[in-house]
Image (cartoon, helix red, strand yellow):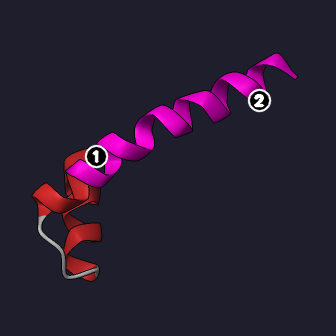
Amino acid sequence: MLTGLLMMISEMSNVTLDDTLSEIKVLAPQIEENIKKNKSI
């Protein structure tokens, strides 16, 4: 499910799946922080 979504995103943006995954790895910690902040409110 998630893999298909990632592949769709990478195809639409004309970047490789590896590039998409590396960007997600960079963004993931920031997203986790936002989730933690939202839960604490």
Residue 9 x/y as whole percent:
29, 69
- The residue shown at (18%, 61%) is 19
Left or right, residue 38 beside residue 35: right
Mark 2 or mark 1, earlier in chain: 1
In this picture, is 8 found above or below 22?
below
Give the Cα distance between marks 2 and 1: 23 Å
Please identify the quadrant where the C terminus is shown. top right
Q: Main secondary structure of the magenta part?
A: helix
Q: Mark on residue 2? A: 1
Please give the name of the residue rendered at 31% of the width and 54% of the height, measured from the top-left corner.
23
* CB-based contact (under 8 Å), mark 2 and mark 1: no
Three-letter residue code for mark 1: Leu
Q: Position of residue 20 (x, y in %)?
A: 24, 59
In the figure, 41 relative to 28: above or below?
Answer: above
- 14 is higher (above) or lower (below) than 34: below
Nearest the eye: 30 or 1: 30
Q: Amino acid at mark 2?
A: Asn
Q: Residues within 10 Å of mark 2 (few under 14, many from 20)?
A: few
- Residue 12's disc number: none
- Number of numbered markers: 2
The residue carrying mark 2 is 38
Q: Position of residue 7 (x, y in %)?
A: 18, 63
Please tell me whether mark 2 sits on a helix, a strand or a loop: helix
- Residue 22, can we see it? yes
Residue extent of the magenta highlight? 22-41
